[in-house]
Image: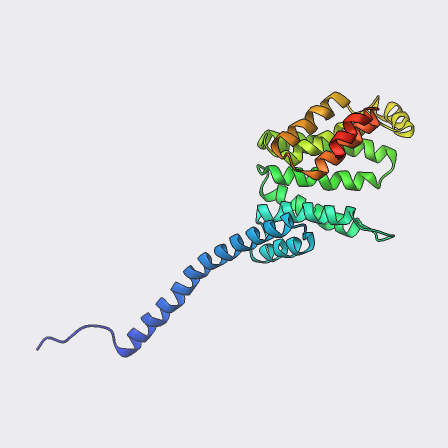
Amino acid sequence: MIERTGFSKVGYLLLFTFMCGAIPDHAAGFQSQNEVDQLINEAVEYFEQGNETRATQLYERVLDIEPENGEALWNHSVLLTQRGFRLKDQTDPMPFYETAMESADKCLEHHPQMAGCHFAKALVTGRIAKRSNARERLRMSKEIKQYIDKALELDPEFAKTWHLLGVWHTEAANLSGVERFAANALFGGAPEGASNEKAIKSFNKALELEPENILTHLDFARLYIEIGEEEKAIELLE
């Protein structure tokens, strides 16, 4: 008589346990990715609605799942920078800026070829520079320009980076008396290549890519006010 071969009851139980353990792990990967994609989409929607606090929270949930997610890191950095800048009264924005800098640095560490990471680094560095003395502002200005240039090299159609470049040229080409003195004494002059003409070109490019961006209109108008072109500023503000 031929003995029948096959699994014992214990064998079937072990096989069933193995399969049940393997499938959920595999499915969990898809589930996590789907959740990440959904959270990012929701964050974008809340940002477009002007709810930056909720958008920030959603990006933080993404980072709880995927701590190195580039899209979440640079957007998280930008949102915290903006929220810090808009604080009122005597609230110190530096805690926001410091966390924003951490996210930007982590983004650059893991995604050096992602334009958003360089944009986020330039933005938060610029906000911190605003709170620094003239010497530090000038030193950081060169650093900011390097990150802006790299972001545009990686993505020439990144409207927000063109906007930031316009702001950089505006500020670097129109230094205050103290800043100009410091620039001449410490750095041999104002940041190289800065001009109001380049600021105008940068703002125009940003508006070409994002015609309805209110902040670009506002900063462009500030430039025209700075150089005495009030009529053009009024047109932008209207």
In front: 160, or 188? Answer: 160
Q: Residue lying furthest left in this view?
A: 1
* Spot occupied by residue 100 in the image (x, y as percentages of width and height): 71, 48
Q: Which quarter shows the N terminus?
A: bottom left
Q: Nearer the viewer, residue 5 or 86?
A: 86
**Residue at 40 percent of width and 67 percent of height:** 21
78 w.r.t. 16: above or below? above
Count of marks overlaid on the render: 0
Q: Which residue is drawn at 71% across and 34% down?
A: 164
Q: Would residue 56 be visible to someone looking at this image?
A: yes
Expressed as whole percent of the image width and height from the top left, the position of residue 160 reads: 66, 36
Is residue 143 visible in the rendered structure shown here? no
**In what quadrant of the picture does the C terminus appear?**
top right
Task: Answer above or below: position of 109 versus 184.
Answer: below
In the shown orientation, is residue 18 left or right of residue 237?
left
Left or right: 176, with 12 as reference point = right
Percent across and percent down for residue 169 are 75, 27
Q: Residue at x 68, y 45 (%)?
A: 78
Q: Position of residue 185 (x, y in %)?
A: 89, 24
Q: In this view, does 212 lie to the left or right of 219?
A: left
Q: State the colouring used for the structure image.
A: rainbow
Question: What residue do we see at 71% from left, 46% from top?
Answer: 101
